[in-house]
Each structure stands twice: as structure tokens, then as C-alpha cells.
């Protein structure tokens, strides 16, 4: 591609490589002239080999493996290994991986007793989780040594392993129940369910169908290339902050209702609609600009989010155990109306990963406030895979420029001289 500055007649040849053009060529021709790209809608911020999305065709692959195959055949911990290491593990690699994660699920007593229990009874679990992840940074000061691969790996294992424990502790604190210690005889997802739901019984045995359904949901949420939360991870990580505070920044971004907070917003929306016969009016309100259809739309997917299709199928397995979530009929009615209405078709708005996931979580007994926490647990593997990738790429600190639109230079005016 040739870029020509009409003012000087100067040109520069810029190759299109892997679907992108290198902005440094632009800088040579036009120093001090910036690409204005708010929300980075047209900007590739990094090369990455982790996740590949094809938004037009609704394709999602982790390290080349289609999400549909991983959801059917894999487990969350195997997918976490794949994202972090780049390959599916052999049995000889998987066993020690699972063992290390299993034996790092405990959190320091002070994190629970002094920190988490210090929150108000009605503290939102995501606010607690974001804080607790950052607090872990103070318990592992060696995590600052981000240039040491072995040290990085130790923190990666700790974070993946401790997220369910922190999440369960936040929930138990919110409902006034005693903290449940990890049970190392259980697998990752069964242990999480036990830490959430155990009451007086000696050991909590998770329903295997529900445990598998949750593990599939964890697989689906594990990574999604340069989404808002992962961009936060890479930005904070580029400053060489430790992985705990970097992960906390990613979780903070995920908490936003435009991002991972949408699964909670979907349930509030469906509950507010209340019945199928009120769906047409709701759709008209959205089209009139009075509110958004939560769980619909996506910056990348301009066709069906492949994860939404898998979640819809998983819902059938869950509802067979828990009973159908009454809000499902409202969700199905919304999808049917929206997919045939030009307002949504013209804007390429389809159900995304958050549209159906909350229905499953609610049917499984999770409070709505826990839904984004359930997103953060598995996305930790993706965030950390991107963190390692950016460090191995030896990327520079993220520091974009701006288009200054403020006032020009002016002199200070003493207080009594101001109008
Ligand atoms: C996630 O990036 C990722 O990969 C994220 C994620 C991941 O795995 O990490 O996939 C997870 O965050 C999924 C998205 C969850 N969020 C929601 O469901 C919230 C509702 N959706 C929207 O707010 C919105 O669709 C976004 C935020 C998801 C995407 O917004 P964009 O790309 O900035 O699109 P836009 O706001 O510019 O909308 C384009 C048009 C606008 O209409 P016009 O101004 O052209 O008239 O579509 C409209 C918008 O008003 N629109 C919607 C809509 N989403 C966009 N109208 C009604 N309901 C919606 N949900």
C-alpha cells in the first residue's frame, strides 16, 4: 500500500502483513500526526498467537482448536494449560499441572479473616474479588520479579488455583456463611461448588451434570483475544506491574456492564420484562433508544457468538436437573423477535456469550451478583496467557498519544482576580 502526503508529494510503501499495516512506517512519513482511533476500534494493539476470532463467521479458536471441540472434549484445566503453554498437554504434562493447581487452592488466612470479612454484608462480590486479587500481591512480593519464567509460572499457578477459593469466600461472606476450605480430593470445578454450597454435611458432592456444565462454561469464558479486560491486563502488565495487580485491573474492567457485567444485566432485564407478552413493547423501547438489549451485540462478532450457541445447548442439560428457568421463555422470545427485526439485523446484533449464561447460573442457584465472578474465574487463564505473551514479546509500555482539544496557553490568575 502507498501512503502519500499530498502536501509534500512524499510517499511511503507500506506492506500489508497478516491483515495489518505497521504504524511505524506512518511515523516516518508524518511525524507528529496521530491515528485517531477512540476505543481502538480499528487498531491492532499487539500480535498474538493465543486466540483467533472470525467475527463475520462466528468462529472462535484457542491456539487453533475450535471452541466447539474444546467444549465437547476438554476440561477447563486442560484448556488453561493449552492457553498458557500453547499446546494440549500430554498425560505426563497434565498430571503435574492438575496437581500443582490442586495444591495451591488455599489462601492466606489473613486474606479471608482480616480482609474479606472486613467487607460489608452487602458488598458486591466483584468489588470484593477485584480487591482480593490485588491484595494477593502483598502476600507474594516475589511476584514483582516478572522477568524470571519460573517465578512467573509459580504466580500463574497460584492465581488460577486461588480464583475459585477467593470467589467462594466472597460468596460465603455475602450470605453470612462460614468459609469452606478447599478439598484437594475434588477436581477444580467440583471443589469450587463444594466451597460454595457445603453447609453441615461432612462433604459436599456436586451433581456431576452441573459440575460438567459449569466446567464447559469455564472453557467458553477462558479467553477472547483483545477484549476490554485483556487489554487492561496487557496495558498494566506492560508497565511491569506484578501479575496480581494486573489481573485485578482486568477483573475491574470485566466488572463493567458493557463487558462481563452483562450476564448480570441480562437477568435484571429479563426479570424487569417479566413476561413473554411484554417482549414486543420492550423491543420497541430498545429500538426507540430507551435502553439496550443486554446480552446482544459484540464489537467483533457480527454474526452469532459461537459460545452463545453452546451455552444454549448446555442449558438443556442443566434445566433437566434444576428445572427450567422461567426467564428462558422470555429470552427465547426476545431472540426470536430480535433476529427477525431489521433494527438488530442492520446493526448485526446477535446474542453474545452473556445472553444465556446467566439463566444457567441462576438455575444452578448462584446469586446474580456472582455471575461476573463466574466469568472472572476462567478468564484468569486467558489474562495470564496474554500477560506471558506480552512479556515474552518484550513489548514496550503502552502509552498512546492524544488529540488535544483543550484551551491554549494562559497565565495564572489570583483567586481575587477570577470572575
Ligand atoms: C463481552 O470484546 C469481547 O470479546 C467481550 C466478550 C469477552 O468474551 O471478553 O465477548 C464478553 O463483553 C460480551 C458483550 C457483553 N455486553 C453486552 O451484552 C452489553 C450490551 N451490548 C452492547 O452494549 C454493545 O453491543 C457492546 C458494548 C457489546 C458492543 O458495543 P460497540 O461495538 O461499541 O457497538 P456500538 O455501541 O457502537 O453499537 C453499534 C450500534 C449502535 O446503534 P446506532 O448508534 O448505530 O444507532 O448498535 C446499537 C448501538 O446503539 N447497539 C445496541 C446494542 N448494542 C449495540 N442496541 C441495542 N442493544 C444492544 N445491546
Image: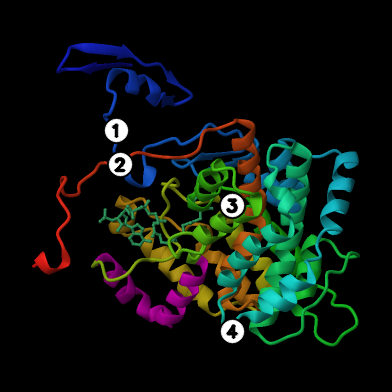
Circles 4 and 2: CB distance less than 8 Å? Answer: no
Circles 1 and 2: CB distance less than 8 Å? Answer: yes
Report the residue marked by disc 4: 120
Task: Bin the neighbour count of mark 4 within 10 Å (Cα to Cα): few under 14, some 14-19, many 20 and up.
Answer: few
Disc 1 from disc 4: Cα separation = 46 Å
The picture quadrant for ligand 1 comes to bottom left
Report the residue marked by disc 2: 402
Q: Nearer the viewer, residue 376 or 146?
A: 146
Q: Position of residue 406 (x, y in %)?
A: 19, 49
| Residues drawn in magenta | 263-287
Could you tell whether 346 is left or right of 5 in the image?
right
Report the residue marked by disc 3: 246
Mark 4 lies on a secondary structure that is: loop
In this view, 286 is above or below 406: below
Circles 1 and 4: CB distance less than 8 Å? Answer: no
Disc 3 from disc 1: Cα separation = 28 Å
Mark 3 lies on a secondary structure that is: helix
Q: Position of residue 417 (x, y in %)?
A: 10, 65
Q: Nearer the viewer, residue 135 or 303?
A: 135
Instruction: State which tag comes first along the sequence, 4 or 3.
Output: 4
Q: Main secondary structure of the magenta part?
A: helix
Please tell me which residue is depicted at 77% across the width and 79% down the height of the picture: 179
Instruction: State which tag comes first along the sequence, 2 or 3.
Output: 3
Task: Bin the neighbour count of mark 3 within 10 Å (Cα to Cα): few under 14, some 14-19, many 20 and up.
Answer: many
In this view, 181 is above or below 296: below
Q: Position of residue 101 (x, y in %)?
A: 82, 54
Instruction: State which tag comes first along the sequence, 1 or 2.
Output: 1
* Residue 73 seen by the camera: no
Amino acid at each position: 500500500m502507498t501512503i502519500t502526503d499530498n502536501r509534500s508529494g512524499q510517499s511511503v510503501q507500506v506492506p500489508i502483513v497478516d491483515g495489518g499495516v505497521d504504524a511505524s512506517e506512518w511515523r516516518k512519513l508524518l511525524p507528529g500526526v496521530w491515528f485517531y482511533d477512540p476505543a481502538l476500534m480499528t487498531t491492532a494493539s499487539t500480535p498474538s498467537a493465543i486466540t483467533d476470532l472470525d467475527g463475520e463467521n462466528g468462529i472462535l479458536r484457542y491456539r487453533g482448536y475450535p471452541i466447539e471441540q474444546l467444549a465437547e472434549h476438554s476440561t477447563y484445566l486442560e484448556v488453561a494449560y493449552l492457553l498458557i503453554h500453547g499446546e494440549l498437554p500430554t498425560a505426563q504434562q497434565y498430571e503435574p499441572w492438575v496437581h500443582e493447581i490442586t495444591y495451591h487452592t488455599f489462601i492466606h488466612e489473613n486474606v479471608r479473616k482480616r480482609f474479606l470479612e472486613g467487607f460489608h454484608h452487602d458488598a458486591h462480590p466483584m468489588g470484593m474479588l477485584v480487591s482480593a486479587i490485588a491484595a494477593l500481591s502483598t502476600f507474594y512480593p516475589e511476584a514483582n520479579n516478572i522477568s524470571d519464567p519460573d517465578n512467573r509460572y509459580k504466580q500463574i499457578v497460584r492465581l488460577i488455583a486461588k480464583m475459585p477459593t477467593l470467589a467462594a469466600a466472597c460468596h460465603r461472606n455475602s450470605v453470612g456463611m462460614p468459609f469452606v476450605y478447599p478439598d484437594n480430593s475434588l477436581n477444580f470445578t467440583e471443589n469450587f461448588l463444594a466451597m460454595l454450597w457445603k453447609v453441615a454435611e461432612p462433604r459436599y458432592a456436586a451433581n456431576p451434570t452441573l459440575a460438567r456444565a459449569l466446567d464447559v462454561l469455564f472453557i467458553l469464558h477462558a479467553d477472547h483475544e483483545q477484549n476490554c479486560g485483556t487489554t487492561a491486563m496487557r496495558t498494566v502488565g506492560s508497565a511491569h506491574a506484578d501479575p496480581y495487580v494486573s489481573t485485578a485491573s482486568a477483573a475491574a474492567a470485566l466488572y463493567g456492564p458493557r463487558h462481563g457485567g452483562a450476564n448480570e444485566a441480562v437477568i435484571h432485564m429479563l426479570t424487569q420484562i417479566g413476561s413473554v407478552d411484554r417482549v414486543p413493547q420492550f423491543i420497541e423501547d430498545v429500538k426507540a433508544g430507551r435502553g439496550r438489549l443486554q446480552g446482544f451485540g459484540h464489537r467483533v462478532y457480527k454474526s452469532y457468538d459461537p459460545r452463545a450457541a453452546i451455552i444454549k445447548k448446555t442449558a438443556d442439560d442443566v434445566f433437566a436437573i434444576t428445572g427450567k428457568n422461567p426467564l428462558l421463555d422470555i429470552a427465547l422470545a426476545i431472540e426470536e423477535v430480535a433476529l427477525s427485526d431489521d433494527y438488530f439485523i442492520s446493526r448485526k446484533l446477535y446474542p453474545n456469550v452473556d445472553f444465556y449464561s446467566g439463566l444457567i447460573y441462576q438455575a444452578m442457584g448462584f446469586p446474580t451478583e456472582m455471575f461476573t465472578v463466574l466469568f472472572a474465574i476462567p478468564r484468569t487463564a486467558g489474562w495470564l496467557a496474554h500477560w506471558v505473551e506480552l512479556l515474552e514479546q518484550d513489548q514496550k509500555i503502552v502509552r498512546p498519544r492524544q488529540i488535544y482539544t483543550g484551551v491554549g496557553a494562559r497565565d495564572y490568575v489570583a483567586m481575587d482576580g477570577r470572575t
